[in-house]
Image (tube, rainbow, N blue to C red):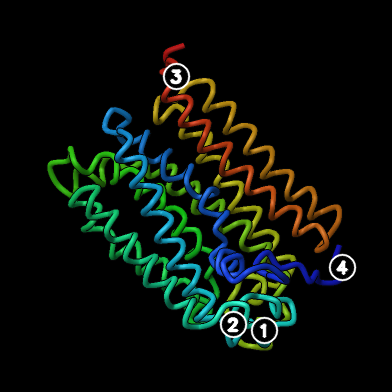
């Protein structure tokens, strides 16, 4: 099953303008990948609370947080990326982006995030520092323990929480009231799904992480252990996704999206079992579709006001 490690790296940049290099640094396109999580959290918490202002501010807050976190991630990992042959074409390593520009992205992104949270509601602003710290702490996780994949999963899971707070916060009577309205089942499903695909992605750096004494599930458990850990996390995520349909009173569109997403998650592991490490880029990229399918399915289901499956 084991094949040679791929040199594939989604963060590499080989040509383009300074602006293009900065956009690659923060993976600007992945903001679109994250937005459905936030909007799904919002419609599950309080569809009637959402207007155009909330929609725009959620997008701006997420753009700001991701820009700050991704820029800081590249800064914090610069020494590691320089030493890893697979990441030698990343913008900070090649000099396509300067440290000054990267720090500017951190500052601008953080300001945009906190201002957007303040304009949403007081509970969004109250929780904003916690979510910011979780995102900014991620690059340090692998230096402290061998489960950074779960940390990353929680960061993406809190995007769902953030959407719920953004939508319902202005109507809430207390912080406890806000947290009670959050779709925690969906938060957990997203967290485990992200942790699962980040675990098999980390197999590419398994030997490097061991040499550098960096924490990861592949470095700790080996190839076989990492694949099984990824499978178990994805199996749990699928169960939670399907369970969320009756729990949140969702209808047939949401159910169809959950089933399709579950099949795509399973397909990733079929690819890995058949083709080994060379299938990691293909399996990893499938997740871009998974997040959009689930998030859009929930949003369309709520907007179309389909009757919940429990009442059919």
x and y, in percent, of residue 201 in the image: 68, 64
x and y, in percent, of residue 121 in the image: 20, 48
Q: Which mark is residue 214?
A: 2
Whether residue 10 is situated above or below residue 88 in the rendered picture = above
**Alpha carbon distance from label 4 to label 3:** 47 Å
For disc 1, the neighbor class at 10 Å (few under 14, some 14 to 19, many from 20) is some
x and y, in percent, of residue 129 in the image: 28, 65
Task: Name the residue located 58 percent from the left edge and 36 percent from the top edge.
Answer: 293
Which label's residue is closer to the chain start, 4 or 3?
A: 4
The answer to whether marks 4 and 1 mark residues whose Cβ atoms lie closer than 8 Å is no
Query: As drawn, is 237 to the left or to the right of 271?
Result: left
Q: Which mark is residue 3?
A: 4
Which label's residue is closer to the chain start, 4 or 2?
A: 4
Task: Name the residue located 33 percent from the left edge and 43 percent from the top edge.
Answer: 164
The answer to whether marks 2 and 3 mark residues whose Cβ atoms lie closer than 8 Å is no
- Between 183 and 88, the one nearer to me in the picture: 88
The answer to whether marks 1 and 2 mark residues whose Cβ atoms lie closer than 8 Å is yes
Residue 226's image quarter? bottom right
The answer to whether marks 4 and 2 mark residues whose Cβ atoms lie closer than 8 Å is no
Mark closer to the observer (4, 3): 3
Mark closer to the observer (2, 3): 3
> Circle 3 is placed at which residue position?
304
**Alpha carbon distance from label 1 to label 2:** 6 Å
Looking at the rendering, in which quadrant would you find the N terminus? bottom right
Tag count in the figure? Answer: 4
**Alpha carbon distance from label 4 to label 2:** 22 Å
> Circle 1 is placed at which residue position?
210
**Alpha carbon distance from label 3 to label 1:** 50 Å
**Alpha carbon distance from label 4 to label 1:** 18 Å
Q: Secondary structure at mark 4?
A: loop
x and y, in percent, of residue 136 in the image: 41, 71
Q: Secondary structure at mark 1?
A: helix
């Amino acid at each position: 099953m084991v094949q040679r490690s791929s040199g594939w790296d989604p963060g590499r940049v080989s040509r383009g303008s300074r602006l293009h290099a900065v956009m690659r640094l923060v993976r600007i396109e992945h903001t679109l990948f994250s937005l459905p999580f936030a909007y799904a959290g919002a419609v599950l918490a309080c569809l009637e609370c959402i207007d155009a202002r909330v929609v725009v501010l959620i997008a701006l807050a997420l753009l700001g947080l991701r820009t700050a976190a991704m820029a800081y991630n590249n800064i914090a990992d610069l020494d590691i990326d320089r030493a890893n042959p697979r990441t030698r074409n990343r913008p900070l390593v090649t000099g396509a982006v300067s440290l000054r520009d990267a720090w500017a992205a951190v500052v601008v992104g953080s300001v945009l995030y906190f201002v957007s949270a303040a304009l949403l509601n007081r509970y969004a602003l109250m929780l904003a520092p916690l979510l910011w710290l979780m995102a900014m702490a991620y690059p340090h996780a692998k230096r402290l323990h061998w489960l950074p994949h779960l940390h990353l999963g929680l960061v993406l899971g809190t995007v769902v929480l953030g959407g719920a707070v953004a939508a319902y916060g202005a109507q809430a009577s207390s912080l406890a009231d806000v947290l009670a309205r959050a779709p925690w089942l969906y938060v957990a499903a997203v967290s485990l799904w992200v942790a699962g695909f980040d675990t098999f992605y980390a197999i590419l750096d398994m030997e490097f992480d061991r040499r550098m004494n960096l924490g990861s599930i592949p470095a700790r458990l080996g190839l076989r252990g990492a694949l099984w850990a990824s499978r178990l996390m994805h199996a749990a995520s699928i169960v939670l996704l399907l369970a969320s349909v009756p729990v949140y009173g969702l209808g047939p569109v949401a159910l169809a999206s959950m089933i399709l997403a579950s099949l795509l998650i399973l397909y990733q592991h079929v690819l890995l079992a058949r083709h080994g490490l060379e299938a990691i880029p293909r399996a990893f990229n499938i997740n871009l579709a998974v997040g959009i399918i689930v998030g859009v399915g929930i949003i369309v289901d709520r907007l179309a006001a389909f009757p919940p499956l429990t009442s059919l």
